[in-house]
C-alpha cells in the first residue's frame, strides 16, 4: 500500500484527526461581503496609463510655456504636482535628473516645482526642466513590481525637444493608489545613464 494519501483520503484523515467524523466535513458557505468592499490593487494597465499621463503633462507644460509664458507654465505645473504626486498623503521622494549637492534630493513640493519650471530664488540652479520645448515622450520599463495598492517601475524615459534633439534618462517611479482609487506618484528618481571613461592609449 502506498504511504502517500490521495487528496480525498487526506481530507478525511484531517477531519478525523481534528475530532470530527466523515459526516462533519461539511463545506463552509462563502462569506458575503456585500457591496462595500473596494479593491484598491493597482493593475499593470493603470501603471502604464500613469506613466503616459506624466509624459503628456511634461509636454503640456513645455507648450504652455512657449505659448503663454512662465507664469502660466508654473500654474499648470503646480496643478500637475497636486494631482499626479502624493504631496497631500505623506510626501514624495523626488530626486530629479539635473540636480547636485544639497539640492539633489527634493523633499518638498516647492523643490519639485522649482525643478520643473524654475523661477525660485531658493533653487538658483534650476532653469526649468519642463520648459525645454519637449515634443515627444516615450518610456521603456525594465521591470515593474506591483504589490497591492502600490507599484514601482524602473527603466528609461526618452524625450525629444522642438529641435529634434533626444535625451534619455534612467527613471524609477513609485505609484500608490489612494483610498479614492486615484494613482499618485510617491517616488520619482531620475539620473543620466552612466558613461564609462574611454580607455587611454
Image (spheres, grey):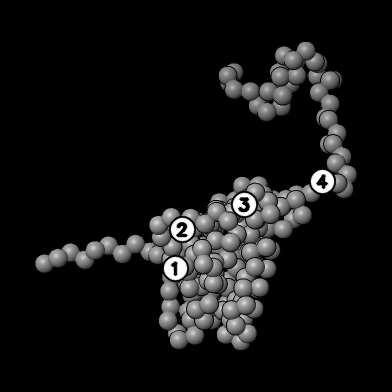
Give the distance between the C-alpha atoms of the residues marked 2 and 4, in whole angstroms: 43 Å
| Residue 48 drawn at (x, y percent) | 61, 64
Give the distance between the C-alpha atoms of the residues marked 2 and 3, in whole angstroms: 17 Å
Mark 3 falls on what kind of element? loop
Give the distance between the C-alpha atoms of the residues marked 3 and 4, in whole angstroms: 27 Å
- In this rendering, which labeled residue sits more in front, label 3 or label 1? 1
Q: Residue 125's mark?
A: 1
The reply to whether residue 60 is visible in this rendering is no
Give the distance between the C-alpha atoms of the residues marked 2 and 1, in whole angstroms: 9 Å
> Which is nearer the N-term, disc 3 or disc 1?
3
Mark 4 falls on what kind of element? loop
Q: State yes or no: discs 3 and 1 in contact (Cβ < 8 Å).
A: no
Q: State yes or no: discs 2 and 1 in contact (Cβ < 8 Å).
A: yes
Q: State the residue at coordinates (71%, 52%).
A: 178
Asked if residue 6 lies left or right of residue 142, the reply is right
Residue at the limit of the structure toward the left, as seen here: 201
- Label 2, on which residue? 103
- Label 3, on which residue? 91
Q: Label 3 crowding class (10 Å Cα cut-off): few <14, some 14-19, many 20+? A: some
* Quadrant of the image occupied by residue 57: bottom right
| Residue 24 drawn at (x, y percent) | 84, 20
- Label 4, on which residue? 37
Amino acid at each position: 500500500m502506498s504511504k502517500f494519501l490521495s487528496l480525498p483520503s487526506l481530507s478525511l484523515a484531517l477531519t478525523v484527526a481534528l475530532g470530527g467524523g466523515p459526516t462533519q466535513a461539511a463545506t463552509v458557505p462563502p462569506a458575503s461581503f456585500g457591496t462595500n468592499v473596494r479593491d484598491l490593487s493597482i493593475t499593470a494597465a493603470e501603471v502604464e496609463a500613469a506613466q503616459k499621463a506624466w509624459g503628456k503633462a511634461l509636454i503640456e507644460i513645455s507648450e504652455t510655456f512657449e505659448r503663454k509664458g512662465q507664469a502660466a507654465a508654473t500654474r499648470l505645473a503646480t496643478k500637475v504636482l497636486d494631482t499626479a504626486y502624493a504631496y497631500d498623503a505623506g510626501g514624495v521622494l523626488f530626486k530629479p535628473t539635473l540636480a547636485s549637492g544639497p539640492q539633489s534630493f527634493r523633499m518638498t513640493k516647492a523643490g519639485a516645482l522649482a525643478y520643473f519650471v524654475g523661477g525660485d530664488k531658493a533653487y538658483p540652479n534650476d532653469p526649468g526642466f519642463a520648459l525645454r520645448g519637449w515634443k515627444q515622450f516615450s518610456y521603456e520599463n525594465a521591470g515593474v513590481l506591483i504589490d497591492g495598492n502600490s507599484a514601482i517601475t524602473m527603466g528609461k524615459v526618452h524625450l525629444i525637444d522642438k529641435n529634434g534633439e533626444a535625451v534619455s534618462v534612467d527613471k524609477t517611479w513609485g505609484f500608490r493608489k489612494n483610498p479614492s482609487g486615484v494613482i499618485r506618484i510617491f517616488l520619482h528618481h531620475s539620473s543620466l545613464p552612466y558613461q564609462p571613461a574611454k580607455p587611454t592609449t
